[in-house]
Image (cartoon, rainbow, N blue to C red):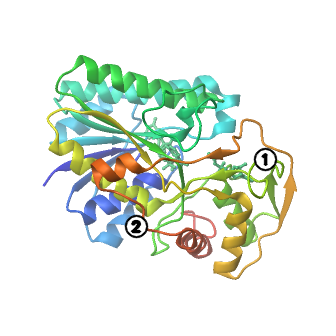
Amino acid sequence: MSTILLAGGAGYIGSHTALELLNAGYDVIVVDNYANSSPEAIHRVERLTGNNIALYEADVKDTEALSRIFANHSIDAVIHFAGLKAVGESVQKPIMYYRNNIDTTLALLEVMNSYNVKNIIFSSSATVYGEENKVPFAETMPRGACTNPYGWTKSMMEQIFEDAAKADDKLSVVLLRYFNPIGSHESGMIGEDPQGIPNNLMPYVTQVAVGKRECLTIFGKDYPTPDGTCRRDYIHVVDLAKGHVKAIDYILAQDKCCEIFNLGTGVPYSVTEIVETFERVNNIKVNHVYGPRRAGDLAELYANADKAFNILGWKTEKTLEDMCRDSWNWQKNNPNGYRN
Ligand code: NAD
Ligand code: UDP
C-alpha cells in the first residue's frame, strides 16, 4: 500500500482528496498549520472512512519539522496543497504570499530530495493561463501574464517544479491546473469553510442563502458572454479529488515524468446560471444585485479537458445541479463551518 503525504491536506480540496485516496486504498498523512483550516476536517474524514490519518500540525516552510515527518514514514508521493489562495489579499500582502507559497514548495522539494522521495503533485491553477490565451485553455499553451501576486506564485512554482524535474532524472512532477472547485462531499460533513467574508462565488451564495450575508453582488453584467455575466468552468470538488487519485495512480506508474493536466469539466456556466440553478435545485432564494465588474476578472475561463481524459482516464461525473445541491447541504448542516 503506497503512502501519500498531503501538505495542506486539512483544507477544502486536501480533505476531499484524503477521503478519495483512502477509499482507493492509499495510506494518507497530513501536514497543515491550520492557517486556513481546522483539524476537524481530517477527523471527519476519519469518521467517514473508518481509517486513521497521521496528522501533523506544522508549517510546511519548516524543513526541520518536515524532516521529522519524512523520517517517521516511508512516503511514496507528496501532494502539495499548502498555500495561501485569496486573490485580493495577495494584492495587499504580496510578500506574505510569495514567502508562504514559494517557501513551502522549496522546503518540500529539499526535504523530499534528502529522503529520496521522488513523486510530487502540485495544486496549480487555471489562473496561470493569464489574459493572452484564448479559451478553452489547453496545456500546450504558454503560461501567460497573471493579474495578481497569487497567480504569479502559481506560475513561479510551476517553473520551479519544471526546473527541478529537468535537473533530477528521478524526480516526477505532475502539475494540476484546477478550474473553479465548488460543492462538497455528499455527506455534508466536509466542505469549504472560508474565514471571514468569502471571496469566491459559491461560498458567498450559500452564506446569503443561510442568512449570514444580506445580498450577493454579481460583478458585472456587460461582459461579452451570452447573459453578460462572467463564465467559469465550475468543477465538483469530489470529481477534482478523484482527479488527484488518478494523478497519483499515474505518477506512481511512471519511471519519470513532468506533466501538466487541466482539471475542469470543459463546460462554462455564467454567474447568473449558478445563482438560478442554486435557487431551483435547493428551492431557496438568493438575494442578489448586479454591480460593477471586479478588477482582474476575465470574461470567460474554461478548460480543454481532453488531456486528463486521454492520459489519466479521468473525466468529471457530477452535474451543476449536484454542485449546487452539495454546496447547500454542507452550508445548511454547518452554518458556522467547522466552528460548530
Ligand atoms: P485551503 O485554504 O482550504 O487549503 C490550503 C491548506 O494549506 C489550508 O489547510 C492551510 O491551512 C494550509 N497551509 C497554507 N499555508 C501553509 C503552510 N505554510 N504550512 C502548512 N499548511 C499551510 O485551499 P484549497 O481550496 O483547498 O486549495 C488547495 C490548493 O489548491 C491551494 O494551493 C490553492 O492555491 C490551490 N487552488 C485552489 C483553488 C480553489 O478555487 N479552491 C483553485 C486553484 C488552485
Ligand atoms: N463573483 C461574483 N460575486 C461574488 C464573487 C464572485 O459575481 O461575490 C463572480 C466573479 O466575478 C467571477 C465568478 O463569480 O466571475 C467566480 O469568481 P470566484 O472568485 O469564485 O473565482 P475566480 O474565477 O475569480 O477564481
Closer-to-camera residue (211/52): 211
Q: Would residue 17 appear left or right of 23 to someone viewing this image? A: right
Q: How crowded is mark 1: few (under 14 residues within 10 Å), some or many (20 or more)?
A: some
Image quarter in which the C terminus is found: bottom right
Specify the quadrant of the image occupied by residue 15.
bottom left
Query: Would residue 179 be seen by someone viewing this image from the given angle?
Result: yes
Residue at the spot 39% in from the left edge and 57% down from the top edge: 241
User: Do tag 2 and tag 1 residues touch (Cβ < 8 Å)?
Assistant: no
Specify the quadrant of the image occupied by residue 227.
bottom right
Residue type for callout 2: Arg
Tell me: residue 84, above or below residue 217.
above
Residue 69 in percent (x, y) is at: 25, 39
Q: Earlier in the sequence, mark 2 or mark 1?
A: 2
Residue type for callout 1: Tyr
Residue at the spot 34% in from the left edge and 57% down from the top edge: 314
Residue 106 in percent (x, y) is at: 37, 24
Image quarter in which the N terminus is found: bottom left
Closer-to-camera residue (337/217): 217
- Residue bearing the label numbered 2: 44
Q: Would residue 276 appear left or right of 59 to someone viewing this image? A: right
Real-space Cα separation, disc 2 to disc 1, in angstroms: 41 Å
Disc 1, SS: loop
Tell me: residue 211, above or below residue 112.
below
Point out the frontmost of discs 2 and 1. 1
- Residue bearing the label numbered 1: 223
Residue at the spot 18% in from the left edge and 44% down from the top edge: 252
**Ligand 2 closer than 8 Å to label 1 CB:** no
Residue 325 in percent (x, y) is at: 57, 75
